Amino acid sequence: MRLKKLIRSLKQENRLPYLVTDLVNIRYLTGFAGSYAYLLVGDGRSYFISDTRYEEYARSILPKAAEFVLQKTDFLDSLNDILKKQGARELFIEEHSTPLSVYRNMQRTLKKVRLSPGGDEVNMVRMVKDEDEIGVLKQAARITDACIDHLKKIIRAGDGEWDIAVEIEHFYRRHGCRKSSFDSIIASGAGSSMPHYATSMEKRVGRGEVLLIDMGCEYQGYNSDLTRTMFINSVDPALERVYRVVQEAQEAAVQAVRPGITTGKLDAVARNIITGAGYGDRFGHSLGHGIGMEVHELPAVKKGDLKLKKNMVLTIEPGIYLPGIGGVRIEDMVAVTAKGCEVLTKSSKDIIVIG
Ligand SMILES: [Mn+2]
């Protein structure tokens, strides 16, 4: 079904045969979750090339429209055979995931075939989720909400940042997740002013400090992503106003999500509020990103003309970061609906004091 849809749009644009090299895209199209495969998408028939490690598994799950091809010494020999048989003169190659080294080997092996950039069509298709995908993303969001609830109950001043990250990993795996979708960011005190802080193995959470937690799980092949900023024992007065500005910006952006709005306009909704409060230069990153089989996928929610569509799923995560003092970020996942959006992560965004 997904493969058919892709073939239809590639055919319209005269981009067949098309070689998919991104394993996540191959998984999206075929269900194959292994670590080595290439998918040659053709008009009518498609060919799935892999090696003996995956032969039995791949044959058991591949859709009918994709034929398993056992590679010989190299996938390029098999690819060459198929293209020769078809008399193909041109091959379109997935762009973001094909290394220059592979491209050079292709030039050497596929001598009679013109190699053309094929864009990233599968990633474009993946932007709009189907109902099943949204159902799984909702579940991933629910587990992450449950995890933050659990953390609020147990975190105390003196806990190590690292111990909190371990607790998150443990919680996720106990609740049916394969793992965290990315290394959890547990940033306490001044460390929280770095948007992508690396959780410390030594730093402990101190009384009166801010605590920023950015985390997500991988559940049935889909990811969640949630950030909450809380305070330990008492609210850091330097960050209370900052918190309220971020909260206002985040909630206004969530309110503004609807089909047809451009990512640029949406980003501006939050950015204008933060700039108006005098923190424009302390919000350096984009407003958010698409999320699905990958934590970061299209669309990038930033300056640009891409229009949101129903069933896109994205994060809304403005932040303000004051070097040496700390930072605040609030992040939710939202699914675009016919008229607005549904917030998939339900955790409270009010200022909370724990410990
Ligand atoms: Mn995120």
Image (tube, rainbow, N blue to C red):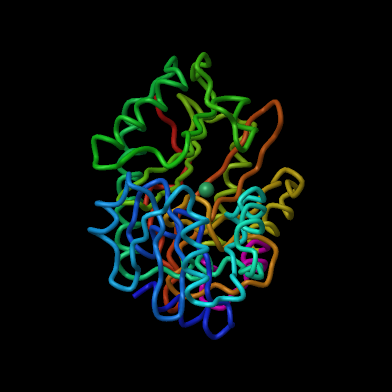
Nearest the eye: 109 or 287: 109
Q: Is residue 346 left or right of residue 243?
A: left
In this rendering, the answer to whether 182 lies above or below 106 is: above
Residue in view at x 54 percent, y 70 percent: 121
In this rendering, the answer to whether 224 lies above or below 88 is: above
- Give the quadrant of the C terminus: top left
Q: Position of residue 333 (x, y in %)?
A: 45, 56
In this rendering, the answer to whether 51 lies above or below 122 is: above
Quadrant of the rendered structure where residue 187 is? top right
Residue in view at x 52 percent, y 63 percent: 80
Residue in view at x 32 percent, y 44 percent: 53
Residue in view at x 34 percent, y 56 percent: 32
Q: Is residue 341 magenta?
A: no
Specify start and end residues of the magenta stretch as a single range: 255-268
- Give the quadrant of the N terminus: bottom left
Q: Position of residue 276 (x, y in %)?
A: 73, 55
Q: Is residue 145 left or right of residue 242?
A: left
Number of marks in the rendered image: 0
